[in-house]
Image (cartoon, helix red, strand yellow):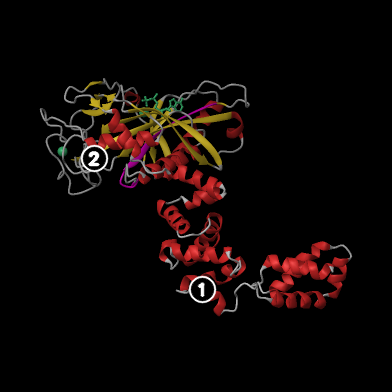
Amino acid sequence: MGSGPLESRWETVIGLEVHTQLLTRAKLFCSCPNLFGGEPNTRVCPVCAGMPGALPVINAQAVRLAVRAGLALGCRINRTSLFSRKSYFYPDLPNGFQTSQWEPPICEGGRVEFISGGRPVSVGITRIHLENDAGKCLHEGLDASLVDLNRAGTPLVEIVSEPDLRSPDEAVDFMRHLRRLLVYLDVTDGNMEEGSMRCDVNISLRPRVKEGEGDEPYGTRAELKNLNSFNSILDAARHEQERQREILEAGGKVEQETRHYDPEARITRGMRSKENAPDYRYFPCPDLPPVFLEEQEVEKIRSGLPEFPEQRRLRFEADFGLNAEESGILTSSAALADYFEAALKAGGGGKRTATLILAELLPECARRGLSWSAVNFSPERLAHTVRMLDAGKVSLRVVREIFAELLDSDLPVDILAEQKGLLQLSDSSVLEEAVRAAVEGNPAEAAAYRGGKTRLLAFFVGQVMKATRGAGNPGLINKLLRQYLEE
Ligand code: ADP
Ligand code: MG
Ligand code: ZN
């Protein structure tokens, strides 16, 4: 999929609407606890059950989390935003309307950048608005449908992207990036199986044009509702892309419609057309005053944001000469990045510390099926190892050789190397002896070197290294070999 005629003739256009449950203590408009599951209808009060006359009160923590998300996604924060009623009929929506934000929403006009398929992607964020979740209908194995309102009133932000995504893979990577960021910021628990994050995928195709020839207008889109796993987003979008391509190539027209993805059958199905033309009849909610935000309040939230993984990554690259892949791994979790920085504080140099983590610690832990935090290699031990390398007491080759033992031992690297007779040899008299033996033991290579094949130096370095079991100081060996061969 995603190759051949599809690549050449049609360009896929995708925009996402991501519903994210906020990590608040209480629901959006009442004080019922915001918890997943529980005995049906045990976390319900007149407000979230939609009783006539019960008055909603906005949850300030939810407002703060929405602002936090908006700032993290580069949005403008509207100092005044408004709740409206969005009319639906659904058995699990007791009010007969959803309380959502129409105009103006709390955040607008952001942008996120992330890497997909090795390339940077930039996606506009149209808006973020607050709204309440519905309850759930239970009909499995029953003759009737039952309604559980525990989830009704859970605070959500809906994050709407611009149609800037160009493939199902980019759409999934966008969702992954969003999830990682919002979980890192404690905006949501990001638990997709429990429905904490789910999205609608809007997708259309248009004829592909050559670079610089301007764009075709967008084609007609279908909206795939309520996808709650990375796999189903990818699967549904790929399937829908293919379905639209077939229609277009047969000379047909794609209808604007809402479709449902069936994860069992792995196909999307259209809904009845009556449901495809919703008239939400938005009108300002008479029970809720506008949400006002003081400039200071927004600034307080802004200054309370931690350094984003992306910023930290770029800082690591600039400060320690790491490439994007290396810095990406070091910032894959806040804990690993903290560990790296703790080792730097303990006195290890940046580049070597990073190399030891990336080339030794993580691969060795992967071989053992353990987390890096589960082995005996504190930031202090890591920093000490780097200092011993810098001081030339142990060679990188020896550290590699004894790394597994180092993790199983309490000894510092230099003592362990000494016990094994692997301390780096910087004693010229010992090395001179090894150099002499290497040259005299290989007269043919020595003659060739002297005759101009100076690339053979590497061969002699190898011989001396072998003789010193990798403990010889390579710089010194090079120098001594040159002297000996060229004198
Ligand atoms: P609605 O509110 O009716 O769902 P919007 O115009 O607000 O419609 O768009 C919702 C989502 O659809 C946005 O994420 C937007 O980027 C995306 N979208 C709009 N037009 C297209 C299109 N032609 N192809 C793909 N996605 C689109
Ligand atoms: Mg929509
Ligand atoms: Zn309630």
Q: Residue furthest right?
A: 451
Q: Is any atom of residue 18 visible in this view? A: no
Residues at circles 2 and 1 in contact by the CB criterion of under 8 Å: no
194, 24: nearer the viewer: 24
241, 327: nearer the viewer: 327
Dot 1 crowding, Cα within 10 Å, few <14, some 14–19, many 20+:
some
Q: CA distance from mark 2 to mark 1?
A: 55 Å
Disc 2 element? strand
Disc 1 element? helix
Q: Quadrant of the N terminus?
A: top right
Going from the N terminus, do you reach mark 2 or mark 1 first?
2
Image spot of residue 287 (x, y percent): 16, 25
Quarter, ligand 3: top left
265, 168: nearer the viewer: 168
Dot 2 crowding, Cα within 10 Å, few <14, some 14–19, many 20+:
some
Q: From what the image shows, is residue 411 above or below residue 270?
A: below
Q: Is residue 25 left or right of residue 247?
A: left
441, 387: nearer the viewer: 387
| Quadrant in the rendering for residue 58 | top left
Residue that numbered label 2 is attached to = 136
* Residue at 58 percent of width and 27 percent of height: 208
Q: Is residue 195 left or right of residue 416?
A: left
Residue that numbered label 1 is attached to = 405
Image spot of residue 486 (x, y percent): 84, 67
Task: Give the prevailing secondary structure in the magenta stretch.
Answer: strand
Image spot of residue 43 (x, y percent): 16, 43
Of the residues shown, which amino acid type is indicated by label 1?
Glu
- Where are the magenta residues, as a range? 191-206
Q: Quadrant of the C terminus?
A: bottom right
* Residue at 16 percent of width and 31 percent of height: 56
Image spot of residue 337 (x, y percent): 44, 53
Q: Is residue 26 magenta?
A: no
